[in-house]
Image: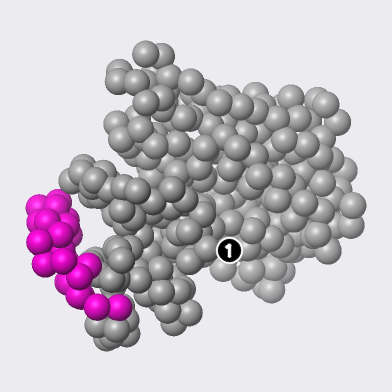
Amino acid sequence: MAFTLVAEPSASVAGALRRFLENAGHEVTVASTVQEGLERVRELAPALVLASITEGFDGEALCRHVKEEAPAIPVLLLYLPEEENPESRAAAAGAEACLVGPLKRATVVSCVSLLMQLSKAREAVSVVRTEMQLMQHQNQGPRPVAASSAADLEFLKRLLFMEVKRSRRYRYPISYLLLEPDRYAELLAPLPASQRTSALAEILRRLTEALRDIDVAVPFAEGRFIVFLPYTPYEGALVVAERLRQRVKEVESVPGLTASMGLSVFEPSAAKGQAQVSFGSLMKEAGEALRRAQAAGGDRVEGGRLTPAE
């Protein structure tokens, strides 16, 4: 069974975190020092590492060691309430996400569950990329990219549905990008199947390389990709979108290739009340934004925030 490593020097805090997670069905092991935490990682390969940042415990150092030795293991860093720049510090350490105290049970359990689910989603995306590469090498006939792993795409859709619900409940931002190469019918569609598959695989590879481990990029339809950015507000999503737009231009197999993107961001407000947003509304907004980007000449990002009704 996959388990979570809690790296926390305080026995009372570690005990509380352990109860939170075990009551939610997670198996937990605890380490009280950075060295002990690293030894647990080496011996047991946990599904996730949850590490505190305190005056006497350098969870960021543990995170950096984990990412050097086992980069696929997600790391969640826990900061004290007075920390002013937790997101930038966590990103610099290589962590997938961070939380700032005081910690509530529902928030901890939700974030741990999300990171584990995203790890599974990344495995599904890896299967898609592998199948695309095999199609390229075997020179198979035409086959829609999205159909190459329908089960994996269905898993991703279920994950996205779930995360919209979590975002509404626990009030964290999520962002979606729909990306489509410009002039697809002119530049990509006429290519032989093997070359077209190779080009799409290269696009997916360059997108994935430009994302955090917590993010997910997957073929959504032939010639279209969906990028899911959890815990990402509007400004951060714009930065990512522009970076991806530039990466598409680096595709070597199709010189001069550009892409249009539709962005849809949900940022729950701090006020109480159920936000009226759904997976369908997010995807609809992203699709409409993509069409606006294409109508404006392509090679651009369009879209914005979906605000909740209070």
Q: Position of residue 122 (x, y in %)?
A: 46, 60
Colouring rule applied to residues: one colour
Which quadrant: the C terminus? Answer: top left
- Direction from residue 309 to residue 220 in the image, left or right: right
Question: Is residue 16 visible in the rendered structure shown here?
Answer: yes
Q: Position of residue 34 (x, y in %)?
A: 30, 78
- Direction from residue 157 to residue 225 in the image, left or right: right
Which one is in front, 275 or 123? 275
Query: Does 296 appear above or below 219?
Result: above
Indicate the amino acid at tag 1: Arg
Which one is in front, 64 or 117? 64
Q: Which residues are magenta?
A: 8-34
Quadrant assignment, res 22? bottom left
Name which residue lies at 20% across and 70% down. Answer: 9
Q: Position of residue 134 (x, y in %)?
A: 62, 70
Name which residue lies at 69% across and 50% down. Answer: 244
Identify residue for label 1: 129
Count numbered badges in the picture.
1
Name which residue lies at 77% across and 51% down. Answer: 246
